[in-house]
Each structure stands twice: as structure tokens, then as C-alpha cells.
Image (cartoon, helix red, strand yellow):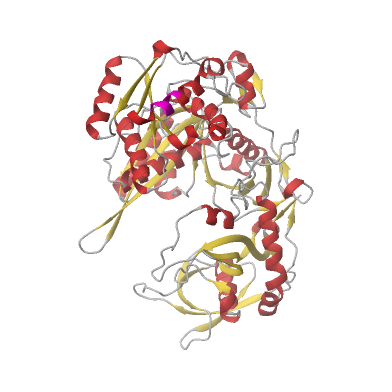
């Protein structure tokens, strides 16, 4: 059982009144509109007010129809009748906003808050309030945050503990603030709404998916990616010997030597035995070269890229630079990544601060080695699929806002896909479409997605994306272009949903990894990381669960079957173990995580006015 961040109303039989007027003509700015549908599905557009207004008719809404409008009505009632001294509304002009932040504690850089949002939960036909903790950073008059993300804000948000370390008590931290909110504000909210809001988080049934299993060379299986590599060879080694090319400034030679020794396994053999032992990857002196530069500039880096290409074999540059502590250092990092990626050379950038910190380096060497091995074309492991392997397309987007001389904004998109299979093996990156959202852009998406699907030998394909792809404009047209016996499913995977939950029987209130609950017939909340059954000790800060929505399928009947959905959920869990960025990397499905990484790089390349690069057909340079 999981207690989710939802306070149900005790009185579910209620109605609310709104005031509406039939709308004709063009829509106006700052007017709230809503479509009411007839029994035959015909929409009629109305202007909406939440208080008596001349020319508007009063209209009663029952609790289980037009739920989005009812939620907005409840929000307005709370907003109008609660003390303004106790609340913050972060998006007052947004008609879609239904969140109210209640101030629990003041902070030098903002407010510690618990937000509430009226919500109708489909799985139990229940009305109530979603609630969660949130630190609101203080803003300036024009709405910009006064403070950049720093240690103080991370502590206030619960990400770090008071000592500045990862907050292993993250779930307890959030729960404590929810209790403070209930003690202070529940009575006042109940007085306004008069629906008898419960003071207990809703308890819902939970289920368990199977734990992850990692596959290595010699068909070995292990429950741990790291221990599996210690005991077995990688799934697939590199095709040839790899050369390694260290690039550093002249005054950082000692730092370069420290990293070299670490990667050989000489400095911390108990935590990292070296590239040769863990990855079976040659790392002898004849495979290693280096160069010391006076400065990192276009001329010097272009010269090094030319030297690397002349070597005539696979070379991984290992570049030592400053930590991304200020804008100049951050710009340098992304400039270096851009230069080598644009030349078709995956590179590894390591900061001086990390190398000089013996403790941090000790536990980072294995992850650095893992990234290098994957960029060199090696495959450390794959995941054991819940069924026959099939193709997975992770789809992401990067946006570019351009301002015209007329003051208009044009939003240009780059949509791309990361191809894996259900075992999590990275296969390719492909651009699906570029441009503004018009017919040409949609045609690019349709053509390229169809071509990828038609180019595979698999009979099953699943698309994972963080947004709702248009069924009418894209997906239904894709289906018409692919084989009728090919099964297509589309899952929307949201890593930033409003849902959270606690297991009151577990250590630190943390649910077990692979726990899931059903929120609606097509929506599930899944814990991709959590306690381990064989070791229920909390060793890190476990993140939020993910919200997965079954969005579309060309096999409607299969999409209704529970076992079919559970199988797709299981493969999402498995994909979270295929992350080659680190042995304890963020537990997101790689179909989503890799897209996030690419989007981050594309955004930074644009921010620093670096030219557009061809991201297709490269090794996983983004790790």
C-alpha cells in the first residue's frame, strides 16, 4: 500500500456554480473560455465567470462532469476567501494554473511552501486536493528569480541535507512539511470549502514489477551492473584497440597524471581496478598520447582535432578543464563538447576540481571509465527484456525562440529520436524534424518516424516521449504508412509530475524500487528507484516516481489488457538500468534520459551561439 499526496474530500456529493455566456466571434485575451459538449459530442464555446456577472447565466456543475472546470472553480473559491498573507500564486495570469502555495516558513532566499491543487482522481472517482512541498525562490518585480540555484536553495528544497550532502531523508523531509501544512491550514481550507477534507493521505493499492537483471558477456546475468562487470566481461568489447589522447593546459600536467593513474587503477584499486581489468580495454602506454596547450582556443583545438584524425583509428580525447562554476567555465565546457562533437569525435571532459578531490575522484573513476568505454563503441551490458526484444524510439524536442523586428516570437523545434531496443542497447540518434510547427514540420515527423519503423525487422515498436504527440496530425498518419501487422504503442513518460507517495511500513517512508500504482485506466505512477528488497538501507536520495500514460496504440484491444500494460511498464523499468552514464546514474529509462541529455546540450549550444551540429549517427557523445 502507498499513501499518495492526495487529501480526499469526505463529502463527494457536491456541486459548484459558474456563470457562463455563449461566445460568438473572435476570442479575446484575458477571457476564460470553456467548451461544453452535447450528448452527441458537439462542442459549444462559452465565456466563463466564477462570480455573478450581468449578462451571464448561472450554471450548476455536478462533481463528475467537466472536472477541469470544477477544479478551477474550487481554486478560485480558495483564492478569494483565504488570507492573502499566507499564500503565493506563482502563475496568476495563467488560466490553466490551479495551484496555491501556502507559506510554511520564511527563508533568506525565498519561502518554504506546500502547494495545493483541486484534483479529480479517476481511479477512485474521488475529489480532493493534491499537495506537495516546494521551495519558492524569491523573485524580482519583473518575475525573474533573485538568486541562482546554489547550495542554500538545494538545502531548502530538500535535495541536500543541512550538511550539504545528498539528503537520504528526502521522503521524511517532504512528509514533515506536509504535516506542518495540515496542522496550520487544514481547518481554514475546510471552512472555505465545507466538504470535509481528510487529514490523511489517501492509501491506494500498489503492485510490484520484477527487479532489473543485467546481461553481460558469456551470457552472464547479475542483479548489479557494477558487480556484474567485476565478475564478467562486458557484453561487447570495442572492435579495435582504442587510442586515448589527453589534452590539458601546461600548468595542469600533474592533474592529467593523477587522472591517468586513476584510470589505470593505480590510485584506488578497491573502487576502480582500471580500464583494462573492469572493461577489458587496453590502456597501455603505447595507446596513450597527450598534449599540453597554452590556451584552449579555436586554433589550438582545431590543430588537435586534425592530429587526432590523422592517427587513423578510434581515438577518445580526454580533456581536463575547469569546473562549471561560472559562465566562462560553463561556456568553455560546452564549447569543447561542441568542437569535438561537430568533428564527429566523442570526447570525455573531466574537471580539475574533481580530479584534485581525492574522495570524489575515488568514486567517480568507474563512471568516467564507463562513459569512455561506451563512447569508444563498447557495450558494457544490456537488460533482460520482459518479452521478445523490440524497437524503442525515445523522442525529444529542443526549442529555439526567435524574436522578430515586429516583436513576434517564432518557435523553432528540433525533434530527434534515440533508438534503443527493449534491452536498452543504444543504437542510433536521428533527427526527425526541424522548423516551426506547420504542415511541413509534421510531414517531416511522419516521414521520418515511418521510415525508422519500416526499416526495422522488429514486429513491435514502442515510442517513449515526454509530451503528448498529436494523434490526428502525426500518429494516425504514421500508422497508415507502416505494415498492418506491426504493433505500435506510444507512452508518455513524465519525470516531473505532481504525484508523490510514501510507504508507511518502510524505512524512511521510501517505497521499494519497481513499485507502481494505478491512477487511471491509462495512467500509472512508477518508482524507478527506491529501497531494495535484499538491502532496505537508504544509501542515497531517491527521486520522485515517474508518471506513465498509455497514450496511443494501433492495437486498441491490447492497450486495454492489464498484462500488456504491465509488460510495457516492466520494460520501462528495465531501460532505467541501461544508463551508461554511471553505475548509479539517474534512474530514468534511457529512452527518456538520453533525450534529456541531448536537449540540454542543444540548448546550451544555442545559448552560447555555437553553430548547429549534425547529431545523427554518432556514438553516445552526450554521456
Q: Is residue 439 magenta?
A: no
Image check: 198 left or right of 369? right
Q: Residue 186 sits in which quadrant?
A: bottom right
Magenta residue span: 253-257
Name the residue rendered at 72%, 43% in the picture: 207
Residue 413 locus on image (x, y percent): 34, 47
In the image, 547 versus 335, the foreground residue is 335
Q: Is residue 289 above or below residue 506?
A: above
User: Splitting the image into 4 quarters, where does residue 602 fall?
Assistant: top left
The x and y percentages for residue 465 are 48, 43
Closer to the camera, 286 or 346?
Answer: 286
Name the quarter where the C terminus is drawn. top left
Seen from the viewer's position, the closer of residues 550 and 216 is: 216
**Residue 556 coordinates in the image, percent (x, y):** 56, 43
Quarter of the rendering containing residue 348: top left
| Residue 616 seen in the current view | yes
Name which residue lies at 67% across and 75% down. 189
Judge left or right: residue 294 versus residue 144: left
Amino acid at each position: 500500500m502507498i499513501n499518495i499526496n492526495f487529501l480526499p474530500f469526505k463529502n463527494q456529493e457536491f456541486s459548484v456554480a459558474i456563470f457562463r455566456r455563449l461566445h460568438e466571434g473572435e476570442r479575446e485575451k484575458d477571457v476564460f473560455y470553456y467548451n461544453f459538449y452535447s450528448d452527441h459530442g458537439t462542442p459549444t464555446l462559452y465565456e466563463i465567470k466564477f462570480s455573478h456577472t450581468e449578462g451571464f447565466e448561472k450554471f450548476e456543475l455536478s462533481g463528475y462532469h467537466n472536472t477541469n472546470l470544477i477544479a478551477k472553480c474550487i481554486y478560485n473559491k480558495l483564492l478569494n476567501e483565504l488570507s492573502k498573507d499566507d499564500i503565493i500564486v506563482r502563475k496568476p495570469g495563467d488560466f490553466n494554473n490551479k495551484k496555491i502555495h501556502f507559506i510554511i516558513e520564511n527563508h533568506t532566499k525565498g519561502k518554504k511552501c506546500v502547494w495545493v491543487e483541486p484534483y479529480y482522481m479517476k481511479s477512485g472517482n474521488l475529489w480532493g486536493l493534491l499537495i506537495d512541498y516546494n521551495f519558492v525562490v524569491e523573485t524580482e518585480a519583473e518575475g525573474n528569480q533573485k538568486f541562482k540555484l546554489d547550495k542554500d536553495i538545494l538545502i531548502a528544497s530538500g535535495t541536500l541535507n543541512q550538511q550539504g550532502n545528498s539528503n537520504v531523508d528526502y521522503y521524511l523531509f517532504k512528509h514533515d512539511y506536509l504535516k506542518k501544512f495540515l496542522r496550520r491550514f487544514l481547518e481554514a481550507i475546510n471552512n472555505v470549502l465545507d466538504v470535509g477534507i481528510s487529514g490523511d493521505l489517501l492509501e491506494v493499492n500498489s503492485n510490484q514489477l520484477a527487479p532489473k537483471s543485467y546481461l553481460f558477456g558469456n551470457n552472464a546475468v547479475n542483479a548489479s551492473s557494477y558487480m556484474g562487470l567485476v565478475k564478467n566481461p562486458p557484453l561487447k568489447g570495442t572492435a579495435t584497440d582504442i587510442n586515448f589522447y589527453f589534452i590539458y593546459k601546461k600548468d595542469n600536467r600533474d592533474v592529467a597524471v593523477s587522472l591517468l593513474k586513476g584510470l589505470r587503477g593505480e590510485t584506488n584499486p578497491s573502487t576502480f581496478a582500471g580500464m583494462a581489468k573492469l572493461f577489458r580495454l587496453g590502456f597501455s602506454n603505447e595507446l596513450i598520447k597527450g598534449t599540453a596547450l597554452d590556451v584552449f582556443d579555436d586554433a589550438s583545438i582545431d590543430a588537435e582535432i586534425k592530429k587526432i584524425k590523422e592517427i587513423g583509428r578510434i581515438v577518445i580525447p580526454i580533456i581536463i578543464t575547469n569546473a562549471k562554476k561560472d559562465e566562462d567555465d560553463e561556456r568553455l565546457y560546452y564549447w569543447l563538447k561542441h568542437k569535438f562533437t561537430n568533428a564527429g569525435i566523442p570526447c570525455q571532459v573531466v574537471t580539475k576540481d574533481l580530479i584534485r578531490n581525492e574522495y570524489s575522484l575515488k568514486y567517480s573513476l568507474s563512471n568516467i571509465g564507463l562513459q569512455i568505454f561506451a563512447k569508444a563503441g563498447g557495450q558494457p551490458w544490456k537488460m533482460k527484456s520482459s518479452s521478445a526484444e523490440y524497437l524503442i524510439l525515445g523522442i525529444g524536442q529542443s526549442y529555439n525562440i526567435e524574436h522578430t523586428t515586429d516583436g513576434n516570437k517564432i518557435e523553432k523545434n528540433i525533434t530527434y529520436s534515440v533508438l534503443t531496443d527493449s534491452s536498452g542497447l543504444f543504437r542510433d540518434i536521428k533527427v526527425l524534424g526541424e522548423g516551426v510547427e506547420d504542415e511541413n514540420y509534421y510531414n517531416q515527423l511522419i516521414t521520418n518516424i515511418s521510415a525508422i519503423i519500416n526499416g526495422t525487422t522488429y514486429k513491435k515498436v514502442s515510442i517513449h516521449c515526454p509530451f503528448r504527440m498529436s494523434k490526428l496530425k502525426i500518429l494516425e498518419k504514421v500508422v497508415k504508412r507502416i505494415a498492418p501487422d506491426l504493433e505500435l504503442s506510444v507512452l508518455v513518460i513524465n519525470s516531473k509530475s505532481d504525484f508523490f507517495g510514501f510507504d508507511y511500513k518502510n524505512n524512511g517512508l521510501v517505497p521499494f524500487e519497481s513499485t507502481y500504482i494505478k491512477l487511471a485506466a491509462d495512467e500509472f505512477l512508477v518508482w524507478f528507484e527506491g529501497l531494495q528488497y535484499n538491502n532496505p538501507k537508504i544509501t542515497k536520495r531517491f527521486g520522485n516516481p515517474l508518471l506513465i500514460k498509455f497514450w496511443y496504440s494501433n492495437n486498441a484491444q491490447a492497450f486495454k489488457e492489464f498484462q500488456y500494460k504491465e509488460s510495457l511498464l516492466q520494460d520501462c523499468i528495465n531501460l532505467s538500468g541501461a544508463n551508461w552514464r554511471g553505475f548509479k546514474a539517474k534512474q530514468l529509462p534511457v529512452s527518456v534520459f538520453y533525450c534529456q541529455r541531448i536537449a540540454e546540450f542543444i540548448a546550451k549550444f544555442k545559448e552560447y551561439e555555437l553553430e548547429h551540429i549534425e547529431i545523427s549517427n554518432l556514438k553516445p557523445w552526450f554521456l
